[in-house]
Amino acid sequence: MSSFTPEVLNAYLRERLGTGVRLIGLERYGRGSSRETWVAQLREGTGTRKIVLRRDPPAGAMIPTPLRNEYLLYDGLGQTDVPIAKAMWWEDGGPWADRPFYLREHVEGHWRVEGLENEGAEADVLRIEISKQHIAALARVHAVDWRALRFDELLPAPLGRNEAAAVNIDAIVARYQRARIDPVPIVLEAAAWLKARAPVASRISLCKGTNGLGEEVFRDGRLVALSDWEEASIGDPAADFAFMQNMAPRIVRDGHTLWSLQHALDYYATLTGTVIERESVRFYGWVRALWMATFSQTAAAGLHRDPQGSEIRQAWTATEINHLAQRILATAMGWLPPLPQSLFEATHRSIEQN
Amino acid sequence: MSYPTCIDMLTTIEATLREKVEPAVDEIAARSALATIYHVLHYIRIAIGAEGQILCDEIAALRMILPRLRDDLARHGTDGRDLALSIGGGLEAPLRDQHAYPSLPELAGEAHLLGNLFHDALEKLIGQEVGRVEEADYAALREECRGHIRSTLVARSRIVDAAYANHDPRR
């Protein structure tokens, strides 16, 4: 933890939580790559508990949105019925650390669901159940009163459904322009192309941004917390269905389609009364490629400016993810043929799945 | 020194990491970092061989299109004239010794500078679309810009597609 050593962290936690607390374990969560996530195990009296510490790497986060926004989202959503870890507090760094961080409660569970990757009809039933749980949780997110929580002070908010897409795209391009270290002119072309054919949003909602396997916490086959709010936005809820990472799988058995994106959208409509068109989901898949190109630039810039302090994943993001984002946009605009789906699936695979 | 080449040594680095370092590593974050390192090493091996020519081609293409963008900016609207001057300056500036074999950082620097001028010119051009959409010259120049972007992407695919063809876990 560089300057924030376990000894310093222990002293800090005792200052904050009382002298009855002792740090007995500290482990970096290896799966995420955009920010640092540490899980601290504490002994309190005769019991133990875990808390999560979150901060940007020394070279800066790969995600070009402020860490404090993420904390404020957790803090605000903790007051709603959205399943989420409760935020504890924010620190600017002060006497304890060389950069800001925040703490939140740890929700016991895992990003994997046992049996989800099995073959067979029983696993199909599980996959559909997990998909429904995830959609139900997203429905709660979309129902959040973001105005009452003042999230429009953190995130750009469209005035009406007609401008949801344009506000989203303009915000991404603005972040791209601030972040970029290399020119990526296809971002400019694609932004103009997308705005010219933007759908009208079904409603204006808080959207989570990154969804699905690897982003949420499950325990005993139940979704217990939505995690990873770095790409949150206010806009068309179709955006959340555009990046679901196996949470809306296509399941075909004995010639019957048991589940699919359309099934997921239909289920969402029964829960919310809101109909999301598949074309809108497809559109926001392209918008997400703009976002991928943007955070690839953040990764590249951080690595170029501080190669010693950067993460190796920044090198991967700045090359493969950067390129794939541009290929998605080129395909959307009809410039190049699509790449095989297997290539995109490979980018989500981690050693924990091997 | 001709041999071993950088590519030889990168291959040895990867093999050493796989055979001697990885078996000694238990911690998941470290093993995950190794998984990514293998891919990045492979990318570098491919890039060493291909990137020089790709950058040379990119620079040549930019030097062909930038004069047309410069001239168009100078003709249409006052806000493009400063950029037109910058493009002119960028095209005329001696960026590297033309008689010396260029290093990859030198080529990257030149492609970066000229690419930024192209990017900024395109941004201005897109901003003019509402008022110029009926102009044949405007449409032709926009199409030429798209062609340039497409060609650059296809060229860079030669590195990225080869480097990441292996579907092993990325992290």
Image (tube, grey):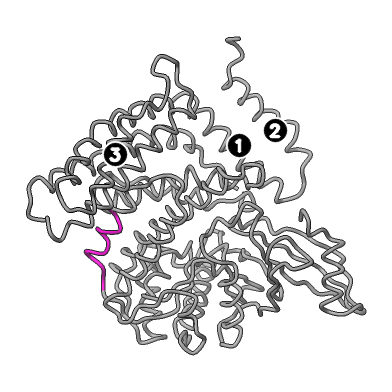
Local packing at callout 3 (Cα closer than 10 Å; few below 14, some 14-19, many 20+) is: many
Above or below residue A204? Residue A190 is above
Q: Which residue is mark 3?
A: B87
Q: Residue A156's x, y, as percent?
A: 41, 74
Q: Is residue A310 left or right of residue B151?
A: right
Q: Which residue is mark 2?
A: B17
Q: Secondary structure at mark 2?
A: helix
Answer whether residue A67 is visible to the viewer in this image.
yes
Kindly identify which chain the residue marked by label 2 belongs to.
Answer: B
- Are labels 1 and 3 assigned to the same chain? yes
Q: Position of residue A228 (x, y in %)?
A: 57, 67
Q: Are marks 3 and 2 on the same chain?
A: yes
- Residue drawn at x 84%, y 63% is A8
Give the amino acid type for the residue marked by disc 1 in the picture: Tyr
Q: Badge 1, how many Cα within 10 Å: few under 14, some, many 20+?
A: many
Amino acid type at mark 2: Leu
Q: Is residue B22 left or right of residue B143?
A: right
Q: Are marks 3 and 2 in contact (CB under 8 Å)?
A: no
Looking at the image, residue B96 sits to the left or right of residue A13; the answer is left
Mark 1: which secondary structure? helix
Q: Residue at x 48, y 62 (%)?
A: A246
The residue that disc 1 covers is B38
Q: Which residues are magenta?
A: A189-199
Q: What's the residue type where badge 3 is placed?
A: Ile
Q: Nearer the viewer, mark 3 or mark 2?
A: 3
Along the line of sight, which residue is nearer the eye, A301 or A329? A301
Circles 1 and 2 in contact, beta carbons < 8 Å: yes
State the separation of the CA atoms marked 1 and 2. Answer: 9 Å
